[in-house]
Amino acid sequence: QVQLVESGGGLVQPGGSLRLSCAASGRVFRFNTMAWYRQGPGKERELVATITLGRNTNYADSVKGRFTISRDDTKNTVYLQMNGLKPEDTALYYCNTQPVAYHWGQGTQVTVSS
């Protein structure tokens, strides 16, 4: 059974940084574009960033220039470096393939507040 395990969230002040990690089974990484999603309070889940097998990346307009997605296929892990965090980045962050093909993990909570 495929498991997606997110970690690295926390409470951070506006302007701060966090690095999220997501570990998954090998077959998930081997063939798929990976992505980070988030769901803020009272909002729908949204796509934040994607990275292909060839390391091409795309970002939601709201995070461009602040977030960086990367992947290490030797560790079956995808990362999200988040800089310049804003209160509106507060959300539960998840990883999955893009398009979504697996059950969601538990997510990791990011709270940006002073």
Image (cartoon, helix red, strand yellow):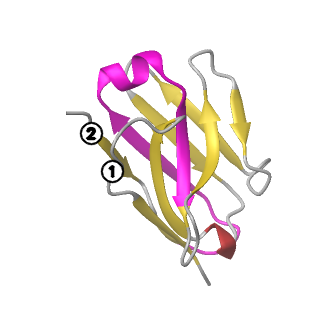
- Mark 1 Cα within 10 Å, few/some/many (few <14, many 20+)? some
Say which of 31 and 90 sits in front.
Answer: 31
| Residue stretch in magenta | 12-38
Residue 25, percent across and down? 29, 28
* Three-letter residue code for mark 1: Gly
Q: Residue at x 33, y 33 (%)?
A: 24
* Three-letter residue code for mark 2: Gln
Say which of 35 and 89 sits in front.
Answer: 35
Quarter of the rendering occupied by the N terminus:
top left
Q: Is residue 26 left or right of residue 112?
A: left
Mark 1 touches mark 2? (CB < 8 Å): yes
Q: Is 16 covered by the magenta stretch?
A: yes
Residue 98, percent across and down? 54, 34
Q: Is 20 covered by the magenta stretch?
A: yes
Q: Name the residue beneath numbered marker 2.
A: 3
Residue 72, percent across and down? 47, 24
Q: Residue at x 60, y 81 (%)?
A: 113
Q: Is residue 62 left or right of residue 5?
A: right
Whether 83 is drawn above or below 55: the answer is below
Q: Name the residue beneath numbered marker 1.
A: 105
Residue 90, percent across and down? 58, 71
Give residue 78's mark. Answer: none
Q: Residue at x 73, y 49 (%)?
A: 60
Question: Which is more N-terminal, label 2 or label 1?
Answer: 2
* Helix, strand or loop status at disc 1: loop
